[in-house]
Image: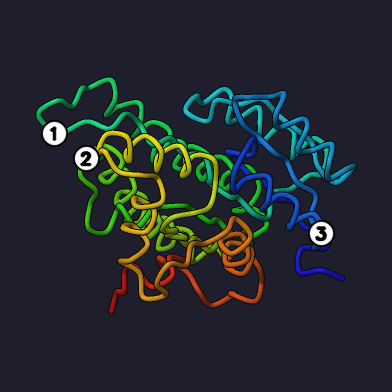
Amino acid sequence: MGRFTGKVAIVTGASTGLGPVMARMLAEEGARVVMAARRIALVEEAAARIGEAAVAVQADVTQEADVAAMVDVAMDRWGQVDVMMNNAAVPGKDLYIWEQTLENWNATFAVDVTAAMLCSREVIRRSMLERRTGSIVNFSSTAGWNGLPRKSHYSAAKASVRVLTKVVAQEAGPHGIRCNCLVPGQIETDLLKNWFARTAQEEGISVEEKRAAVLSGVALTGVISTPEDVAKMALFLASDDARTITGQSINVDAGGVMIG
């Protein structure tokens, strides 16, 4: 028996990177999983690798109708939602503040913050309130602690996710619903590799030099989280093992940011 036997989870941003890993690990521990993202072909491939415990859904989680339809799938198939993993995110375009555009700013906030609100709202009022149980995990970034140059849009959005988490935890707590925020640092994904390559070229250094410079700032020097490292913490926060943990932002970043 796994920690999620008999439970239903929704994972957004489930096409690449962390999302498919969390979905697989949830299914391995007994969950039935709705996997959602805009790129349906990639989500279908990831769901097929998991098998009957997973279903793929095409959804733009910045759109209310898509979010409602995504939750419909979970409710129609399995009658409940126990876990909401608000993993969908975009980095936006790297711009100094004097270059910043409203389009870039709003598009980043729409995916990184508004989508988490919409998904949380929908699963709480459609399933969790009535059943007086549920766990929501939001995903921030260490950029949301101290900021990141050329990432005012992303840093501000990810900081907002932490405050959203606290408010949801306070409002939903009396109804038996928990909400926590996972705060990753660098994660070994294609997105990060592309960022290393792009910024290294801009700075006129090698990718290896850029990578070493970034990872020299963490306590576990040179260590970078894998998607599995982050997923393990996400599953812990979503599980009954964390039943008295709510409203918290937990770093998974090899000691890059230390709060407290």
- In the rendered image, the vertical position of residue 102 relative to residue 131, given as above or below: above
Q: Which secondary structure lies at badge 3?
A: helix
Q: Which mark is residue 97?
A: 1
Are circles 3 and 1 on residues that touch, CB within 8 Å? no
Are circles 2 and 1 on residues that touch, CB within 8 Å? yes
Observer-nearest residue: 82 or 59? 59
Q: Determine which residue is flagged by label 2.
A: 152
Q: Quadrant of residue 7?
A: bottom right
Q: Which percent across, then down, holds residue 260?
A: 28, 79
Going 36% across and 34% down the picture, which residue do you hit? Answer: 198
Going 30% across and 27% down the picture, which residue do you hit? Answer: 106
On the rendered structure, is 103 left or right of 85? Answer: left
Q: Which one is earlier in the sequence, the residue at label 2 or at label 1? A: 1
Q: Determine which residue is flagged by label 3.
A: 28
Quadrant in the picture for the N terminus: bottom right
Three-letter amino acid code at the position of disc 1: Ile
Nearer the camera: disc 3 or disc 1:
1
Q: Which percent across, then down, holds residue 76?
A: 79, 35
Three-letter amino acid code at the position of disc 2: Ser
Gap between marks 2 and 1, in whole Å?
7 Å
Three-letter amino acid code at the position of disc 3: Glu
- In the rendered image, the vertical position of residue 63 relative to residue 218, given as above or below: above
Q: Which percent across, then down, holds residue 4?
A: 76, 63
Going 20% across and 22% down the picture, which residue do you hit? Answer: 101
Q: Which one is earlier in the sequence, the residue at label 3 or at label 1? A: 3
Q: Quadrant of residue 162?
A: bottom left
Gap between marks 3 and 1, in whole Å?
44 Å
